[in-house]
Amino acid sequence: MYQTLREKSAAILEATGPYRRVGHAIDIFLIVLILSNVVAIVLESEAKIAKAYKLEFFYFEMISVAIFAVEYLLRLWCCVDKFDYRTLEISEWKKRVKYVFSPLAIIDLVAILPTILMAFITFDLRFLRVIRLLRIFKLTRYSRAMQLLLAAFKEESSSLLAAFFIMNVVLIMASCGIYLLEHDIQPDKFGSIPKAMWWAMATLTTVGYGDVVPITPLGQLFGGVITLLSMGMVAIPTGLLASSFANQLRKRREVFNEAILHALVDGEVDRNERAHLDALRTELGLSHIEANQAIKMMTSQRVSTLYCRHCGKKL
Amino acid sequence: MYQTLREKSAAILEATGPYRRVGHAIDIFLIVLILSNVVAIVLESEAKIAKAYKLEFFYFEMISVAIFAVEYLLRLWCCVDKFDYRTLEISEWKKRVKYVFSPLAIIDLVAILPTILMAFITFDLRFLRVIRLLRIFKLTRYSRAMQLLLAAFKEESSSLLAAFFIMNVVLIMASCGIYLLEHDIQPDKFGSIPKAMWWAMATLTTVGYGDVVPITPLGQLFGGVITLLSMGMVAIPTGLLASSFANQLRKRREVFNEAILHALVDGEVDRNERAHLDALRTELGLSHIEANQAIKMMTSQRVSTLYCRHCGKKL
Amino acid sequence: MYQTLREKSAAILEATGPYRRVGHAIDIFLIVLILSNVVAIVLESEAKIAKAYKLEFFYFEMISVAIFAVEYLLRLWCCVDKFDYRTLEISEWKKRVKYVFSPLAIIDLVAILPTILMAFITFDLRFLRVIRLLRIFKLTRYSRAMQLLLAAFKEESSSLLAAFFIMNVVLIMASCGIYLLEHDIQPDKFGSIPKAMWWAMATLTTVGYGDVVPITPLGQLFGGVITLLSMGMVAIPTGLLASSFANQLRKRREVFNEAILHALVDGEVDRNERAHLDALRTELGLSHIEANQAIKMMTSQRVSTLYCRHCGKKL
Amino acid sequence: MYQTLREKSAAILEATGPYRRVGHAIDIFLIVLILSNVVAIVLESEAKIAKAYKLEFFYFEMISVAIFAVEYLLRLWCCVDKFDYRTLEISEWKKRVKYVFSPLAIIDLVAILPTILMAFITFDLRFLRVIRLLRIFKLTRYSRAMQLLLAAFKEESSSLLAAFFIMNVVLIMASCGIYLLEHDIQPDKFGSIPKAMWWAMATLTTVGYGDVVPITPLGQLFGGVITLLSMGMVAIPTGLLASSFANQLRKRREVFNEAILHALVDGEVDRNERAHLDALRTELGLSHIEANQAIKMMTSQRVSTLYCRHCGKKL
């Protein structure tokens, strides 16, 4: 099945077929490496630690980037044999170009670029050092649940954008109101609408730092109204996401029930169908108990309710 | 279909029929203009910027208001031929009066009024300048998702009002309690119930500025209880909106499913019905994937339950 | 129907039958009076205002309490003929005793008691004055939506109690941890576990005053973990209420659908049934649109789906 | 049924069979003792109180630990006859080992260990004293609702972990951004990424202490964006839990409805079935009203759909 070296590499990187175990081991190694990198970069920002372990940080960075670079080139080389690219009827080079501009490949590139740039540019080292933290996004590849979360965000995106728009309108109104009321008494804090926005933002998101606060009675009355509005501002995205998550869950359940119905056409769930349902269950992220209950319930319903009105037999 | 100039103008402003493209271009131009206006007014509130670009701001404002005024008069002139006014059996002038007092027309008027007033009144220029920010509400016309959000708010309005009422009762009780406990020790901060309300409001909405804080042990005990209550205060509107959004989504899905059922009366979804379903899908704000899944699922259910597997007849 | 004066009074106070209008007018008068009282008491706590309008406040209070007292006595007198007491087979005096100890009657008594006490006791006037604010609870009688909210709270009470219990465990653990870590450096702020609770409470409820804050690196690390936990603490009650509200809504819809099914037994919804459904709709707090849609949908479903397997006829 | 002393003890500790009352009395005694212990330890951390009541605290602690130790040994002795261990086909000693490593037994051990250790070690008394607070977890045994809450957490654990992961990515990005922007102006507060995390954590969880705050315009702009993101961070776990709680509720209802359907096979719910349903209702944590409504509704549906109105036969 996987004959050439390139096909084997692709299978290992995707952890499919007989290379499942090797692939998973490599995945875990990379995850640990990414996390160690993040910890190292965070610690390196502390001046004392950076000085004390200068060489260690340097070697660790070099080795990490080398590994990430090898990974990047390897993926680029064998992307042609990836599961979802294999059946595409375009030339190998077009596949490679397509891969290079895919989100995951861009993230992989961003993970190695800053260090390579640092060798050439000496302009703003600190910025480049910190930007290496972006390699944390390499973890996206490994989190299925996060992909489900992002799907929920995407689905509700138009409503969330509307919520964001409302938030902005309220934000501008709040800044403008507090600017009018507190402008003269606290010119250093509410001297212009952009300055007043800092207070409005901290208030509307219920963060409430307290470094900037209205002090006139009218300003506090207005501020009180804004704190009340803040509850609505927080409630809208939360409500939208809660409703969206519930909807996602319902749809996944429905897909699963549909599969059960399909398996029940012949009256019972046999062993093959059971294995198929189990694979689907894992993919949809449903729990064992829930799946079993659904199968049990639909089986009993199937048996008890449907009769033909012509011949009177059980369906 | 659109013969007179007035009818054509109405069609352009509503972006319907053959004038869809022109209408959309004008919409986008107006949206950009509104946003630029908001940015300009916000920046103008910064004294330095206002001084440096005084003339530019003035010309931009004049041109903007001129455009908005033309838009207002145009809409007023051809509102008679609007889609939802055309069939009304009242005289043209009554339609115009009706239009003038519609929310969107009032928003349009508010957008130009302050600048016109500024030419005559010299009384409080800053207030008038800032009040021009209200023209951000002109954007309401263009956001469908926001209209859906507002619908959810409206539907749950009686429950939200009840939540607001409970909030007020708790607010008054909290202010009154902290006033009794901290009145003597911090007379400048908790000297009266209205003053104590500032603390109560910041606490109950979980904003928590920290500029005013109880310091006596008893006051802190009471404050602790109020912080606990604040979680409930935040939970109520959030819970209500979450439940309301979920309900809205469910109802939109039901309307869509009903339409699918209707299209499936003859056993399949033909091209016309598909186009109709797609239009409905857009209007209801459902995603492509969800709609296709619903159609697929209902078609298969229809097929699997509508024929007997024994006698093969339709049920 | 309402013959004696007492029966008439009961009907007026309950705003039923022919006395609906008069009853509602009295309700509105009392609501306005209660709200004015609350405003007056809040303002009176401001020393300047209290001094300037001493006499006005005194007369307003006297008149208000007189009216509330008359209301209380009137309700006590004619509670025997209340709708839900009329059919009870107990003596008139037992009904009165039962009424006196009902929540609404206790609230009514609490509204007048402090002022009456003030005439006799001269001990702590300020406390008694503020306690008069409890008369705001008299408004409970008039808010149906609030009663629905309270029902949701009551239904979810066992889960909310469990959430409250978890909150307390986390609170104690957080206080105890921060006490161990910050005890030596900030003895005035984290000198004992009860003191540390003030910080833990402000943090776990995401209020975050900032008057007390860990300053050691270890304390801040621990504090960071607690802020993360705070999101869970806020999420639990919100999630519970959201789920509970959604459940309430669903149940109300089901009751309504059941009523529609009942009305559809003869195949259509006639005028009487329509009126009955409309009354039920108002009671359940469902919107017009939702109710109509449910009726339409169930009517069409009824027609299209059910056939007898014996005779093959439509059900 | 319960013959040996060990069997009787097990029955008492589990409050089953004829020993229900005695078992519940012991439960309540232990709950009160645990709560008193917690209160005592919290108060003892206050130096003044600890000094004043030194002896009382000591005796109370000794007696408490003695009782907890007896309880622990008793449970260990008769765990062999526990309801869920009785039918296990392993030797008595294996059961005991299995019990010792069960979560509840570990909690019980942790409750007595610190005090026993204190007799031997004199190293860090304060730490050991405070660690005794862990005995609050002994309450877990008695709270069914909390076990349901924990089940909801467990079920949604993969999504919550994903949310936690996203939170961490955003946290690191926020710390790194604010570090770059505020590093030079406030080196004591944003001098390194770990230091900047304190601000990022307080902001992203909407706690917002305000002890550390960006002051440069660019830093405040970035801070404003982070406050906006904080709303999303709070919304994700809340939305997940809301959806999960709703799902749990739905599943419990479905289990209950399934049981009703089962009981309705013979057309009605008889007394035995009623008792069985009631036990199930308690176990599932459904309210009386809800259960009755479900039974009533399913009975009427069963009746109305199971007979043809034309031929009168059962469907």
Image (spheres, coloured by chain):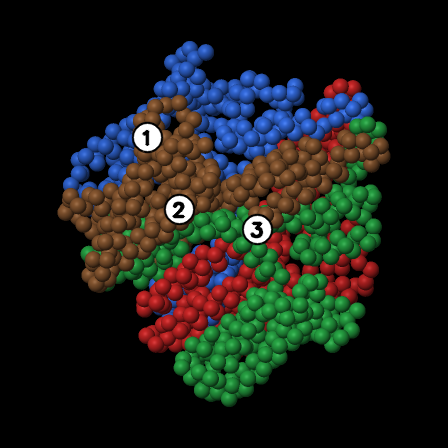
Chain colours: A green, B brown, C blue, D red
Residue drawn at point x = 40 percent, y = 70 percent: D178
Q: Within the image, what quadrant is residue A91 found in?
A: bottom right
User: Does residue C297 appear to the left or right of A270 in the view shown?
Assistant: left
Residue in view at x 47 percent, y 82 percent:
A118
Q: Type of residue at label 2?
A: Asp
- Residue C293 image label: none
Q: Which residue is mark 1?
A: B96
Type of residue at label 3? Phe
Label 2 sits on residue: B27
Q: Chain of mark 3?
A: A
Kindly report the distance in space between the C-alpha atoms of the residues bearing marks 3 and 1.
Answer: 46 Å
Which residue is pictured at 39% across the width and 17% down the height?
C19
Give how far across and how far down residue A302 sits, in percent: 77, 39
Q: Secondary structure at mark 2?
A: helix
Q: Position of residue A193 (x, y in %)?
A: 28, 57
Is the N terminus of chain A in the top left, top right, bottom left or bottom right quadrant?
Answer: bottom right
Mark 3 secondary-structure assignment: helix
Give the residue at mark 3. A245
Relative depth, front residue between B308 and A181 = B308
Residue D10 is situated, as x and y percent measured from the top left of the image, at 72, 55
